């Protein structure tokens, strides 16, 4: 019985795309609308009408977000193996760059942050890393990550080294 009348629901859904629809973009969100798949229009908070047949919407949170990339096992300049992790706080400032100009911005930000951490950790000795962990090291991480993620439409507020510990990596299989 369901299959017999299923086509009615399909027709109603397709007809619904012909009716203008209201979208609410909240105070803590930014959005873009893609008209006819090619015209990108940045949209701020408020009420917006659109034609579902011709327009696609994408939203992103515009308030502070925290990203914690995976732990890394690295070798310092003095050949000490360390495990380190960082915390990144950022705000989306350009929704077009964030949502349209790249694929999976959070993953890209995480990967680039890990690359900056790697570059900084492998260029120092363990003693230097421990000595400057709360001062100039965090400032250098912030500048490196800010410059790396600039094309993604985010403003990085802070980057902090949350874990730095000597470690031993064992490889059991080839």
Image (cartoon, helix red, strand yellow):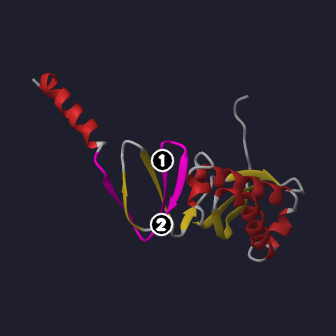
Say which of marks 1 and 2 sits in front: 1
Q: At which x and y percent is residue 61? A: 48, 63
Earlier residue among tags 1 and 2? 1
Q: Reply yes or no: does residue 157 show up in magenta.
A: no
User: Which residue is nearer to you in this view: 142 or 47?
Assistant: 47
Residue numbers of the magenta segment:
19-43
Q: Which residue is mark 1?
A: 35
Q: Is residue 1 left or right of residue 82?
A: left
Q: Are marks 1 and 2 in contact (CB under 8 Å)?
A: no
> What mark, if any, has residue 113 been given in the picture?
none
Q: At which x and y percent is residue 11? A: 22, 32
Point 73% across, 54% down: residue: 167
Q: Image height check: is 79 above or below 136?
A: above
Quadrant where the C terminus sits is: top right
**How many marks are shown on the rendered structure?**
2
Identify the element where label 2 is drawn.
loop
Label 1, residues with CA under 10 Å away: few <14, some 14-19, many ≥20: some
Q: Is residue 31 left or right of residue 138?
A: left
User: Which residue is nearer to you in this view: 62 or 139?
Assistant: 62
> What mark, if any, has residue 44 been given in the picture?
2
Quarter where residue 161 is shown: bottom right
Point 19% across, 27% down: residue: 7
Q: Reply yes or no: does residue 39 show up in magenta.
A: yes
Q: At which x and y percent is residue 2? A: 13, 26
* Farthest residue, direction right: 78
Point 76% across, 62% down: residue: 147
Label 2, residues with CA under 10 Å away: few <14, some 14-19, many ≥20: some
Q: At which x and y percent is residue 58? A: 46, 52
Separation of marks 1 and 2 at Cα, in angstroms: 16 Å
Quadrant where the N terminus sits is: top left
Point 30% across, 43% down: residue: 18
């Amino acid at each position: 019985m369901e299959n017999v009348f299923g086509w009615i629901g399909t027709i109603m859904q397709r007809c619904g795309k012909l009716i203008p629809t209201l979208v609410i973009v909240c105070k803590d969100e930014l959005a873009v609308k893609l008209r006819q798949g090619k015209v990108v229009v940045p949209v701020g908070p408020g009420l917006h009408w659109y034609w579902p047949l011709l327009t696609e919407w994408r939203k992103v949170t515009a308030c502070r977000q925290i990203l914690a990339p995976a732990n890394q096992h690295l070798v310092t300049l003095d050949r000490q193996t360390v495990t380190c992790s960082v915390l990144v706080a950022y705000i989306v400032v350009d929704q077009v760059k964030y949502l349209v100009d790249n694929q999976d911005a959070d993953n890209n930000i995480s990967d680039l942050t890990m690359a900056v951490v790697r570059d900084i950790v492998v260029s120092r000795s363990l003693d230097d890393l421990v000595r400057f962990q709360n001062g100039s090291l965090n400032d250098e991480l912030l500048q490196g990550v800010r410059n790396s993620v600039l094309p993604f439409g985010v403003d990085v507020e802070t980057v902090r080294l949350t874990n730095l510990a000597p470690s031993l990596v064992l490889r059991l299989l080839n």
